Image: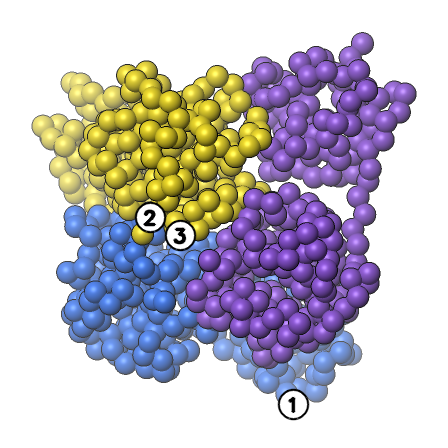
Chain colours: A purple, B yellow, C blue
């Protein structure tokens, strides 16, 4: 079964996602499309990149189409990238960092193609809807096998791809300084650290910690804390996260993206 | 065609639903997934149970996956249940009442399996995302036929399943006392009664009634009342409901879940 | 591959869309359903008609099911319409104007059938959920080929179909007077004109124009204007549109549907 997975910031209120599905079905009737999500905040390339990275391993190998594209119609490149670690996976989207984290996660890029002038495009190409006119048709042809990656455009040096920098957690005498990478719709906060970063810090599962000075439990599940209780835990993707049982940690702690979060032993 | 239907409170803003689709597609590429809805209010087990019950008959027989799971990671059981009235239907989800109404609707449970330690799980199992790691893989294997229900876990006495109690409408001298079971996004109110409960009450279709003292029409369609008019009607699922034409009955009547609603003949 | 495309105002918070998918899958297991969108504003027949018209060409030929149906249960007809310009396309929905623009776009109607009493309906037919009980089953049988269009109901003279009137842009000495047809969720405003209507007006791509007296750039892409800049452009569907880069043109200009928008050369 050939598969296209599809992530975007198009939302589902308009027909943008549906039209891309239509375009893919016309080109590649036998290809299945799996929607990763279309709920990425508008133009939030980093959120899209983080979600694509974490979702990738749970998706069948295939063409991974992603469109969060604030510079559509401007000079940014459009690319298709074959993963070095799993050559059955090809990432398709704008070259603005959106695909970068997923590409790193699957071993880097073994073959990069600039598809901005792809012969596979839907003519006439609009200035503002490259999801429909460039990315979806390229993804459909690649998934169906009606074009090879080399036939999808012009070769590109993978070293020229736009990269995406993330903050990095660091250990200090005061504790582990982490950063807010992302929040889901429940207000659960994804940090840039894992259990392993807490090793040597004296913190232990089941014990109290402080999070920016506020008492929390370093726990495994929501059920370990009372309603409205704050917990530090490893989320479903093995990343350290903050949550409030049946509430929003983002709101409770007054956090914004990239804010520092100090995790330290409770006094 | 093997089918998994999928209901949850995950919403579509994040990748949770998409990732479960990916997990199912990897295990069971030929199985089709039909989304019932992912718009159940967060952690609202009863709303999920009511929606699953009413939607079931319209779904192809198959594996009916449902995840509204406020106690994920705690002691609640994870189960797979074969329906007594249609053995081609298997319900998969947390044992917190979510599956109970659907199971009753399809004749009770003929075989119950505890899948909390299922060999079909995705390892390592996270503490907070059992939809992905436990329920979706179990559903996928059962739908694909790559495991039997007995192979999915440990046998369980159906009498031990968590039940879900609902309020019950009752006839009184003052009229029929019903309760608010649920509201849809339009503010239409679903009551715990049907047309048949109004038999003998003197109420007749096309006549005025009072609803908590407020005048309404006992009607068949929205078009029977003017804009902003209140109507009592049998909804698309044959359940007595309240609506305001192009408005919200929930708001107009100031109702909350489980509130009593007295339906009586108009003076 | 037989296809049903599906557009509605049901939203995804409830099970209405999912139940229609279930009904189609039970009748026509091999038919694929592509969701165009279910985010049409509640009861907004015109918005549904405009979105259906523009999306149609990007969808595989098949049965195009559309349900925005404020008069469900009243006297409005339910219809299935074969397109004159592409007889592989059949439109199914209420006869309230929703299908009109799409029918015109695909060359008019060569065969019209009243499906209100179709033998293909799901019995018993509810008063309020014809999407499930009338339209989805008719669409499923037509797509699967288990009934012909003639077998779906009673013949109807296409001249009797409910039409949908739109405002029309007109050239004046002061400039081009257009109207607000629609806005997407970003607040981008769709007008009732195209590039060709600006020919002879002295307006040129890349030049400043005024939009209701406010300065804007007549541009090809969002990237041509600074953040918060107003632009007039041809949208992804080749229709003149207004946008604010990373903002809402609808809000910035204080517009409502059908409002006049005067486009003139900048002084």
Does residue B141 appear in the picture of this structure? Answer: yes
Residue C2 vs residue C254: left or right?
left
Label 2 residue SS? loop
Residue positioned 55% across, 48% down in the render: A59
Residue positioned 42% across, 60% down in the render: C34
Same chain for labels 3 and 2? Say yes or no. yes
Q: Nearer the viewer, mark 2 or mark 1?
A: 2
Where does residue C208 sit, x and y in percent of width and height?
Answer: 76, 76
**Alpha carbons under labels 3 and 1: distance apart:** 57 Å
Question: B215 or C42, which is in the foreground?
Answer: C42
Q: Label 3: chain?
A: B
Assess whether mark 2 and mark 3 are in contact (beta carbons under 8 angstroms): yes
**C15 versus C238 height, above or below:** above
Res B141 quadrant in image: top left
Query: Which comes sooner in the sequence, label 3 or label 2?
Result: 2
Quarter of the image that includes the C terminus of chain B: top left
Pointer 1: what residue? C200
Question: A202 or B120, which is in the foreground?
Answer: B120
Where does residue C255 sit, x and y in percent of width and height?
Answer: 59, 61
Farthest top residue in view: A267
**Alpha carbons under labels 3 and 2: distance apart:** 7 Å
Same chain for labels 3 and 1? Say yes or no. no
Residue positioned 29% across, 66% down in the render: C143
Pointer 3: what residue? B30
Label 1 residue SS? loop
Where does residue B28 sit, x and y in percent of width and height?
Answer: 43, 47
Q: Which mark is residue B2?
A: 2
């Amino acid at each position: 079964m050939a598969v296209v997975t599809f992530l975007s910031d198009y939302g589902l209120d308009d027909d943008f996602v549906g039209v891309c599905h239509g375009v893919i079905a016309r080109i590649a009737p036998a290809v299945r499309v799996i929607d990763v999500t279309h709920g990425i905040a508008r133009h939030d390339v980093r959120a899209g990149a983080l979600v694509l990275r974490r979702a990738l391993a749970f998706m069948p190998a295939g063409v991974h189409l992603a469109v969060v594209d604030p510079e559509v119609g401007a000079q940014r490149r459009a690319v298709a990238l074959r993963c070095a670690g799993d050559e059955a996976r090809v990432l398709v989207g704008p070259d603005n960092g959106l695909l970068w984290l997923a590409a790193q996660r699957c071993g880097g890029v073994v073959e990069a193609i600039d598809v901005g002038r792809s012969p596979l495009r839907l003519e006439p190409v609009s200035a503002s809807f490259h999801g429909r006119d460039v990315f979806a048709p390229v993804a459909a042809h690649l998934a169906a096998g009606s074009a090879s990656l080399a036939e999808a455009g012009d070769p590109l040096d993978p070293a020229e791809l736009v990269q995406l920098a993330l903050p990095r957690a660091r250990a200090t005498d005061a504790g582990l300084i982490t950063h807010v990478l992302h929040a889901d719709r429940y207000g659960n906060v994804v940090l840039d650290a894992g259990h392993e970063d807490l090793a040597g810090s004296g913190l232990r599962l089941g014990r109290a910690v402080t999070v920016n000075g506020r008492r929390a439990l370093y726990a495994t599940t929501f059920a370990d804390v009372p309603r409205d209780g704050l917990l530090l835990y490893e989320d479903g993707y093995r990343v350290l996260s903050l949550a409030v049982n049946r509430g929003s940690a983002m709101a409770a702690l007054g956090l914004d993206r990239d804010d520092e979060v100090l995790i330290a032993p409770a006094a």
